[in-house]
Image (cartoon, grey):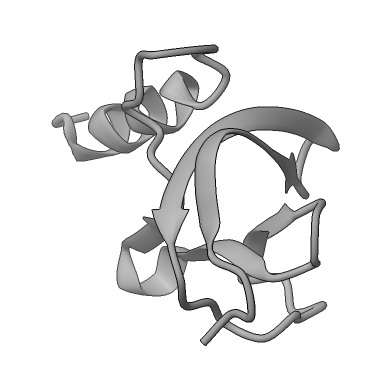
């Protein structure tokens, strides 16, 4: 449980693979502990909590923020586009 939840529309999250910072919408009060493991693909720049995982060998991906959010920036929409593309037949 986080001492202060992640709530609001302007939370900076680091996409580790590209080094890009996404401005995200969030609404959660729990998080996974900080990790340097490669599976931890997204990290909060506020407190270092893990904001996303990727397990390609299991075809499993997850984010803790709302990539579909529309009230502000659309920085995270490419996440959904990549997930949908991965499901399309080759």
Locate residue 49, reporting x and y percent: 69, 70
Q: Is residue 9 above or below residue 63?
A: above
- Residue 49, above or below 24: below
Residue occupying the point 17% across, 30% down? 88
At 24% across and 30% down in the image, what residue appears?
A: 84
In which quadrant of the rendered view does residue 34 lie? bottom right
- In the image, 35: left or right of 55? right
Relative vertical location of residue 90 with respect to residue 32 in this rendering, above or below? above
Residue found farthest to the left = 89
Give the camera-side residue of 64 and 27. Answer: 27
**Image quadrant where one finds the C terminus:** top left
22 left or right, relative to 52: right
**Image x and y of residue 21, in percent:** 78, 31
Residue 43 image position (x, y, % from top left): 71, 58
Camera-side residue of 17 and 27:
27
Q: Quick one: which residue is furthest to the front in this view?
A: 4
What number of labels is visible?
A: 0
Location of residue 86 in the rendering, given as x and y in whole percent from the top left corner: 30, 37
Q: Nearer the viewer, residue 65 or 4?
A: 4
Q: Nearer the viewer, residue 59 or 62?
A: 62
Q: Residue at x 34, y 30 (%)?
A: 80
Question: Is residue 19 shown left or right of residue 5?
Answer: right
């Amino acid at each position: 449980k986080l001492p202060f939840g992640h709530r609001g529309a302007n939370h900076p999250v680091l996409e580790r693979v590209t080094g890009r910072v996404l401005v995200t919408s969030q609404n959660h009060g729990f998080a996974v502990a900080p990790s340097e493991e490669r599976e931890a693909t997204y990290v909060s720049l506020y407190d270092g909590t893990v904001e996303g995982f990727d397990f390609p060998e299991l075809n499993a991906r997850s984010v803790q923020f709302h990539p579909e959010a529309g009230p502000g920036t659309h920085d995270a929409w490419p996440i959904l586009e990549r997930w949908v593309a991965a499901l399309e037949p080759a």
